[in-house]
Image: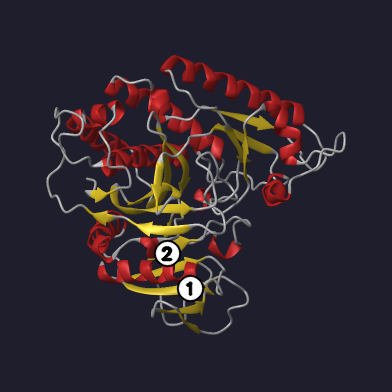
Amino acid sequence: MVPHLVTALTGPINELEQRVLDSMPAIERWFRLEWMEHTPPFYSAVDIRNAGFKLAPVDTNLFPGGWNNLTKEMLPLAVQAAQAAIEKICPEARNLLVIPENHSKNTFYLANVAQLVRIFHMAGLNVRIGSIDPAIKTSKKIELPNGDTVTLEPVVRSKRRLGLKNFDPCTILLNNELSAGTPGILEDLHEQYLLPPLHAGWSVRRKSNHLHSYEELSKRFGKLLGIDPWLINPIYARAEGVDVAEGRGIDVLTSHVDAVLTKVRRKYKEYGINEKPFVVVKGGHSGSGSPGVVTVRDAKDVEALIGKPRGGAGLPAAKAGASRELREPTELIVQEGVLTNERVHNGVAEPVVYMMDRYVVGGFYRVHAERAADENLKLPGASYVPLAFSESAHLPQPGAKPGASAPNRFYMYGVVGRLAMVAASYEMEATDPDAEIYE
């Protein structure tokens, strides 16, 4: 189900959390029935924001890095989930090939790869790392600051299979978002399982498809719990045909920002929330590592924030990197911003939930001391604080008064994370594997 972990918020359980805890049997049954009909992503990580009055996912990653941020106490959960996932796909699996990003100099990322190797090795597989980076021509052993070592080996492609010299895997695990496009070396493989599938990569995937799937699921889930789906779902809009560099479609973007802000203001008024609404604007098919997320608090700020050269509007230096990211896509997402109510070491924090197959295996906090509660935390300077298992082994008692039992906030985060995971499952089913690559 969901591990019982200590979270940053330890105050009284709010109404939404209480409703989730009271509905635990119905929720778990709902998930079981979903997984009877749909295949979960092989692994995933979901960024969650808890505003106190609202709890929602803001990013779903189908090629999660950061596995090195899970504590060693969480490893058994990940190993069990890995065994279950592999058994379901290829019970006779013996050899697993991990294909990482081409970040051979990024030791933090490679520590994540080493942790993945450790998890699948403990799950009973022979695991090796095959690089598709053309610069890796011979075996390359890299020692990491934490004491781990990783060995990158150049992949060998035959007519029908992908492997290494003297290593023929039946299963290939991608830890590569394919942001730069789908490499031909990964296409047309026969009798090998490629996990996740190629159409989960950012060369094909669109955030709007995921958000649409999540919106539909949140309506059904809201009906199950008897809650307004808005409490777990950010309002969003797609702005198509926007070319920031050329200044085309800015009016379309502005109108979408205005419309989303208007809807959010209406909700804030309905619930008596005394906060200033904001939206985030981001690329519709950019990888989770992209810093291109711009916070907008008023529709009239759009031109200045994205640097449209009209009337001499200057671009603040802090926004320059984000603006460059937004120059690429023709589809932008305007999403209701969700405040984060959590603080770790006096820094603004957001929980990240890690899942493998249908199981929550752990999580950590992304913390940024220099960012505000309404800003993107996925930027240089962020730190990662592992969650610890609760000393209390008992689960919160359904029906208990708020604050009367130990608040397992992570259960609630696990529910929202799994809801995003179901949405990703729907999204993958609806995506044509032969979809055209974006130019």
Three-letter code for the amino acid on which mark 1 is drawn: Gly
Give how far apart the Cα atoms at labels 2 and 1 are.
9 Å
Q: Name which of mark 2 and mark 1 comes first in the sequence.
A: 1
Residue under the image location 37 percent in, 66 percent down: 116
Observer-nearest of 371 and 82: 371
Three-letter code for the amino acid on which mark 2 is drawn: Ile
Q: Is residue 439 visible?
A: no
Q: Is residue 431 visible?
A: yes
In what element is the residue under mark 2? Answer: strand
**Disc 2 vs disc 1: Cβ atoms closer than 8 Å?**
yes
Callout 2: few (<14), some (14-19), or many (20+) C-alpha neighbours within 10 Å?
Answer: many
Which residue has dot 2 on it? 172
In what element is the residue under mark 1? Answer: strand
Residue under the image location 14 percent in, 30 percent down: 400
In this rendering, the answer to whether 147 lies above or below 277 is below
- The quarter in which the N terminus is drawn is top left
Within the image, what quadrant is residue 227 found in?
top left
Callout 1: few (<14), some (14-19), or many (20+) C-alpha neighbours within 10 Å?
Answer: many
Observer-nearest of 72 and 266: 266
Q: Residue 189: x percent and y percent? A: 49, 61
Classify residue 279 as left or right of residue 312. Answer: left
Q: Residue 427: x percent and y percent? A: 46, 38
As drawn, the label of residue 77 is none
In this rendering, the answer to whether 149 lies above or below 354 is below
Which residue has dot 1 on it? 130
Residue under the image location 38 percent in, 28 percent down: 53
Q: Residue 386: x percent and y percent? A: 34, 58
In this rendering, the answer to whether 410 lies above or below 289 is above
Q: Residue 336: x percent and y percent? A: 53, 30
Residue under the image location 15 percent in, 31 percent down: 398
Observer-nearest of 87 and 83: 83
